[in-house]
Image (cartoon, helix red, strand yellow):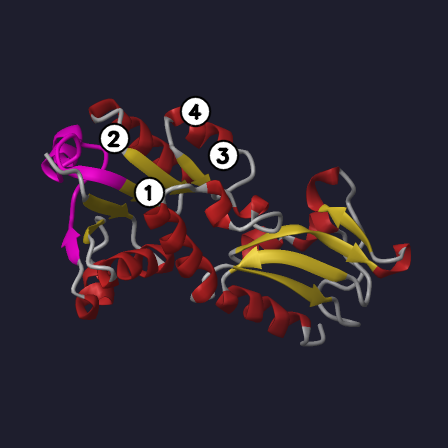
C-alpha cells in the first residue's frame, strides 16, 4: 500500500502555509483540527479538512494512520498536544514520519523522546537553516518555504528607544514572552562593546537605550513589538 498521504494537525498560520505549499505541489494533504474556524481560513485553498479528536486512537486510525498516511506535521500551539499526538501516532504506526514544532526551549527533548522524527526548534534557527535538520526533500523544501519565503518566522534585532516601556528595565521584568508571541534569544549590549548576552545565560540584564533585542517570531508580532518600542512610555 502506498503511504503518500500527509496530515497536518492544528489551525494556525504555520499549518495553513505548510498545507498550502504541499497542496500546490499536488500532494494528498488533509488539515486536522477541532477548530471549525479553520474551514473558513482554508476554503479558498481547496485543502481537505477533518474535524477529529486527536486524543482518540480510533479517530486517528480513521484518518489513515497505520494505513496510507506516511507523514504527519504536528503544529499545535501547545507542546503537550504535540507530545500526545506524537506518542499516539507512533503507537499506531512506528514507521510514520512525524515533524513537529517546539514551542519552548525545554520541549525539544520531550518531543524527540515521544518519538518525533524531526523537531523544528526556533532556538536553533539562527545557527542553521531548518532544511539542514531534515533530509527528506519534501519536508525540507516545504518547511524552508513556509518559514522563510513566506516570512512566517523571522529573526530580528529591535533597538531599545529612549524612554520606551523597556528602557531601564531588566529582562526578568520585560515579560516579552507573555505579552508578545515571540521568543527572546538575547540582547546585544552596546555598553559592553556589542557583546551578545544569551537570554538563558542566567544574567538578568538591564535594558538600556540602543541595546538590541534579538527575537524570533512572525513578522506581524515583530512589527508590533517594534511599534510599541518606538512609542514613548
Q: Does residue 120 appear anywhere in the picture?
A: no
| Residue 68 in the image, given as x and y percentages of width and height | 13, 37
Magenta highlight range:
48-71
- Asked where in the image residue 38 lies, by quadrant, the reply is bottom left
Q: Which structural element holds mark 2?
A: helix
Q: Which structural element holds mark 3?
A: helix
Question: In which quadrant of the rendered image does the C terminus lie?
Answer: bottom right
| Residue 78 in the image, given as x and y percentages of width and height | 40, 42
Q: Earlier in the sequence, mark 3 or mark 4?
A: 3
Question: In which quadrant of the rendered image does the N terminus lie?
Answer: top left
What's the distance in space between the residues labelled 1 and 2, CA to CA? Answer: 10 Å
The residue that mark 4 highlights is 113
The residue that mark 3 highlights is 107
177 lies left or right of 71: right
The answer to whether marks 1 and 2 mark residues whose Cβ atoms lie closer than 8 Å is: yes
86 lies left or right of 93: right
- Asked where in the image residue 25 lies, by quadrant, the reply is bottom left
Q: Which structural element holds mark 1?
A: strand
Q: Residues within 10 Å of mark 1 (few under 14, many from 20)?
A: many
What's the distance in space between the residues labelled 3 and 1, CA to CA? Answer: 14 Å
What's the distance in space between the residues labelled 1 and 4, CA to CA? Answer: 15 Å
Q: Residues within 10 Å of mark 4 (few under 14, many from 20)?
A: few
The residue that mark 2 highlights is 89
Q: Residues within 10 Å of mark 3 (few under 14, many from 20)?
A: some
Q: Earlier in the sequence, mark 1 or mark 4?
A: 1
What's the distance in space between the residues labelled 3 and 4, CA to CA? Answer: 10 Å
Q: Which structural element holds mark 4?
A: helix
The residue that mark 1 highlights is 74
The answer to whether marks 3 and 1 mark residues whose Cβ atoms lie closer than 8 Å is: no
Q: Nearer the viewer, residue 20 or 53?
A: 20
Amino acid at each position: 500500500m502506498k503511504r503518500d498521504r500527509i496530515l497536518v494537525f492544528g489551525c494556525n498560520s504555520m499549518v495553513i502555509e505548510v498545507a498550502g505549499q504541499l497542496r500546490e505541489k499536488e500532494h494528498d494533504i488533509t488539515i486536522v483540527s477541532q477548530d471549525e474556524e479553520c474551514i473558513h481560513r482554508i476554503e479558498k485553498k481547496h485543502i481537505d479538512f477533518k474535524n477529529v479528536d486527536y486524543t482518540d486512537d480510533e479517530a486517528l486510525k480513521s484518518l489513515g494512520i497505520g494505513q496510507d498516511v506516511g507523514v504527519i506535521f504536528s503544529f499545535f500551539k501547545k507542546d503537550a498536544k504535540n507530545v500526545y499526538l506524537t506518542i499516539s501516532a507512533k503507537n499506531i504506526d512506528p514507521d510514520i514520519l512525524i515533524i513537529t514544532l517546539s514551542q519552548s526551549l525545554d520541549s525539544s527533548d520531550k518531543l524527540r523522546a515521544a518519538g518525533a522524527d524531526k523537531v523544528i526548534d526556533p532556538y536553533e534557527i539562527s545557527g542553521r537553516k531548518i532544511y539542514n535538520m531534515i533530509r527528506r526533500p519534501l519536508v525540507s523544501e516545504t518547511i524552508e518555504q513556509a518559514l522563510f519565503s513566506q516570512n512566517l518566522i523571522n529573526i530580528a534585532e529591535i533597538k531599545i528607544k529612549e524612554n520606551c516601556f523597556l528602557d531601564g528595565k531588566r529582562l526578568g521584568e520585560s515579560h516579552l514572552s507573555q505579552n508578545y508571541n515571540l521568543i527572546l534569544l538575547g540582547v546585544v549590549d552596546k555598553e559592553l562593546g556589542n557583546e551578545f548576552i544569551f537570554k538563558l545565560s542566567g544574567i538578568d540584564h538591564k535594558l538600556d537605550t540602543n541595546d538590541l533585542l534579538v527575537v524570533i517570531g512572525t513578522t506581524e508580532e515583530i512589527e508590533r513589538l517594534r511599534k510599541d518600542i518606538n512609542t514613548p512610555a
